[in-house]
Image: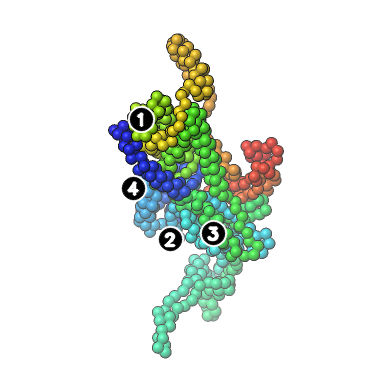
């Protein structure tokens, strides 16, 4: 069958060339459309339920919110793990699903079960699903800075919550825009208990009066002068004065008792569970772009940057947007490094082929067929949704060396035949077909065995499976493409390109030099077989000691370029104190000359993907270009100096 495919390809060589051109075009289109990222997403399929229960202690939140939700979610189809976390004010329930579960199917099932248990929760507990994002969805962060001093933290937070958030959520690929730090404005009624006692008003009546005083009521319509007029009573609070005039009750003399008679009304900040700080200069308001699951990180970040550029013109005078984290830099460095290495590998393979085949046109067969095999792998990658990252591109890099084996052997066999029968015309094509058929079937099956060599990796599960499966997929796809091309396109390319004088093998100086060193070694090995086997066994046994000292890691170190510093404080620390601590810490970090900026976060952002307590910190440190560093300073030495 393989012989028939080879002969059929040579007989229909122009059809094969046209098919190869279409394959190249489709491969280039897929290459440009393949999403880019730095590393594979190792996150589980998870759905988060965040429930705000204002003013309640963690134990109350656990008993009344977290436990009922967690027990109800145990019955969700496909859920393998349910985890609940209770904090002051907030509850987080994580539902982890089996691998391969569609995220949006999982969200719909969780929403279905949530609708059943929600009526059993306290009235003030408001559950909501978290964003359709994964654990690596934080792709971009920025900070709002006003160096003129005209806008305080409350103004900047309002700008983030009511302007930037809604504008950025319209960007394709963005799941959520979360705020960090700042002050959320609220009206505060500070009740004087002595005044309440003097009027005999319970606190619950004050709360009910405020709720009744902040609503509108419709009164249908009134028909006047052949027109309809909608009747409504406007009662929304718009100022402190509106709050002060809310009536609580009437005293014995008929005088209304107003809210201002029992409480001081003022504007103040909402209870804070997170603090942001920039460069040791004081508190700042930050924003986090959370990418939708399965999105193209590089394209999403690019669209966010373009949107921010258009929004800068609408910001108040003196307010600036400062980038504090940008994953696209890591993606660009990682992919460009691998692209460079792949290109170098292409060049080396081509040069080695030209050197050993001693025929430049023969090397062109490798130069043409090798990129086609890689492009074919990208077509399948794009269809499957595999991102181009260090693991998937690494699989292609591993495959390149083996992809050209069949081509080289086939070319060498054609060289032998052409040395013996340097014919032209149709006789030459028949000779090439016979030479390719002679070695084609064994070469095809040898490449097929190499193609299937990574099959055991597909049996890996969970995080290790998600980490290594892109490498196995791309290596398998590239080898499969090379296997098919070796019996279709390669014989045709040999017929078109392998022309001119074919130098015998003994005329190649490189081959002569290598054979001169190889013959004595192989002669000695065959003359003393047991000594050769013993030396090999001894060499294998000598590996035991160094192998036991190597150690192991789940994955190698990845120099992202930025540094994440995660301090922690004692539980129960106040928001004011953590703001002071993170400012002092950032000021010390900024004293290192190589540091460009540092943005510290203590506590959590306003998103379900961040359940950090107030005592937990995350500081992102950005470095200047290495050209601006002090002489002879390595990157690994900076954290210890900082």
State the mark number for residue 566. none
Residue wearing tag 3: 307
Q: Which residue is nearer to you in this view: 117 or 471?
A: 471
Residue at coordinates 57% horizontally, 72% vertically from top-left? 239
What kind of colouring is applied to the model shown?
A: rainbow
Q: Which residue shows up at 60% across the image and 64% down it?
A: 313
Judging from the image, what secondary structure is the residue with disc 4 in?
loop
Query: Pointer 1 and pointer 3: residues touching (CB < 8 Å)?
Result: no
Foreground: disc 2 or disc 3: 3
Give how far apart the Cα atoms at labels 3 and 4 are: 40 Å
Residue indicated by mark 2: 123
Judged by depth in the image, the label closer to the viewer, 1 or 3, is 1
The mark closer to the camera, 3 or 4, is: 3
**Foreground of the two, 41 or 415:** 415
Disc on the earlier residue, 4 or 2: 4
Q: Which residue is mark 4?
A: 77
């Amino acid at each position: 069958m393989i012989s028939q495919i080879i002969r059929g390809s040579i007989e229909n060589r122009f059809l094969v060339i046209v098919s190869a051109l279409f394959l190249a075009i489709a491969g280039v289109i897929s290459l440009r459309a393949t999403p880019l990222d730095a590393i594979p997403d190792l996150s589980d399929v998870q759905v988060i339920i965040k429930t705000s229960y204002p003013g309640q202690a963690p134990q109350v939140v656990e008993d009344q919110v977290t436990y009922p939700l967690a027990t109800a979610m145990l019955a969700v189809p496909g859920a393998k793990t349910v985890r609940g976390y209770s904090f002051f004010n907030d509850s987080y329930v994580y539902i982890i699903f089996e691998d391969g579960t569609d995220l949006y199917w999982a969200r719909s099932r969780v929403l279905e079960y949530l609708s059943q248990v929600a009526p059993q929760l306290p009235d003030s507990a408001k559950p909501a699903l978290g964003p359709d994002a994964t654990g690596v969805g934080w792709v971009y962060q920025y900070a709002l800075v006003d160096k003129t001093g005209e806008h305080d933290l409350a103004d900047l937070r309002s700008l983030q919550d009511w302007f930037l958030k809604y504008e950025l959520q319209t960007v394709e690929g963005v799941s959520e825009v979360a705020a960090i730090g700042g002050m959320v404005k609220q009206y505060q009624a500070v009740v004087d208990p002595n005044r309440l006692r003097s009027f005999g008003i319970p606190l619950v009546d004050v709360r009910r009066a405020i709720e009744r005083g902040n609503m509108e009521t419709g009164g249908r319509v009134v028909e006047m002068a052949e027109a309809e007029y909608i009747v409504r009573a406007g009662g929304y609070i718009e100022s402190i004065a509106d709050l002060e005039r809310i009536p609580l009750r009437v005293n014995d003399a008929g005088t209304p008792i107003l809210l201002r008679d029992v409480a001081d009304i003022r504007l103040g900040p909402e209870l804070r569970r997170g603090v942001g700080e920039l460069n040791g200069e004081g508190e700042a308001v930050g924003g986090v772009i959370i990418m939708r699951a399965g999105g193209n990180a590089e394209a999403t970040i690019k669209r966010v940057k373009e949107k921010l550029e258009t929004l800068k013109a609408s910001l108040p005078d003196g307010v600036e947007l400062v980038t504090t984290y940008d994953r696209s830099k890591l993606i660009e460095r990682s992919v460009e490094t691998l692209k460079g290495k792949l290109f170098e590998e292409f060049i080396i393979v081509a040069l080695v082929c030209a050197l050993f085949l001693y025929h430049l046109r023969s090397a062109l067969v490798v130069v043409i067929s090798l990129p086609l095999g890689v492009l074919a792998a990208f077509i399948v990658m794009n269809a499957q949704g595999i991102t181009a990252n260090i693991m998937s591109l690494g699989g292609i890099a591993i495959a390149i060396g083996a992809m050209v084996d069949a081509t080289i052997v086939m070319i060498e066999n054609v060289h032998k035949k052409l040395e013996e029968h340097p014919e032209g015309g149709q006789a030459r094509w028949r000779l090439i077909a016979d030479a390719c058929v002679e070695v084609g079937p064994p070469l095809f099956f040898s490449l097929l065995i190499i193609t299937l060599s990574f099959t055991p990796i597909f049996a890996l599960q969970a995080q290790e499976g998600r980490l290594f499966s892109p490498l196995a997929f791309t290596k398998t796809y590239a080898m499969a493409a090379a296997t098919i091309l070796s019996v279709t396109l390669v014989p045709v390319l040999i017929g078109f390109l392998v022309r001119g004088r074919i130098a015998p093998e003994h005329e190649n100086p490189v081959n002569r030099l290598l054979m001169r060193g190889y013959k004595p070694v192989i002669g000695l090995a065959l003359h003393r077989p047991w000594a050769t086997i013993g030396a090999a066994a001894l060499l294998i046994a000598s590996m035991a000691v160094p192998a036991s000292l190597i150690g192991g890691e789940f994955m190698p170190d990845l120099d992202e370029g930025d540094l994440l510093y995660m301090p922690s404080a004692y539980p129960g620390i106040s928001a004011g104190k953590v703001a002071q601590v993170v400012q002092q810490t950032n000021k010390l970090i900024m004293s290192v000359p190589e540091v460009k900026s540092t943005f510290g976060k203590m506590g959590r952002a306003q998103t379900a993907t961040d359940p950090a307590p107030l005592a937990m910190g995350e500081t992102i440190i950005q470095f200047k270009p290495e050209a601006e560093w002090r002489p002879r300073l390595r990157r690994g030495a900076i954290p210890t100096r900082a």
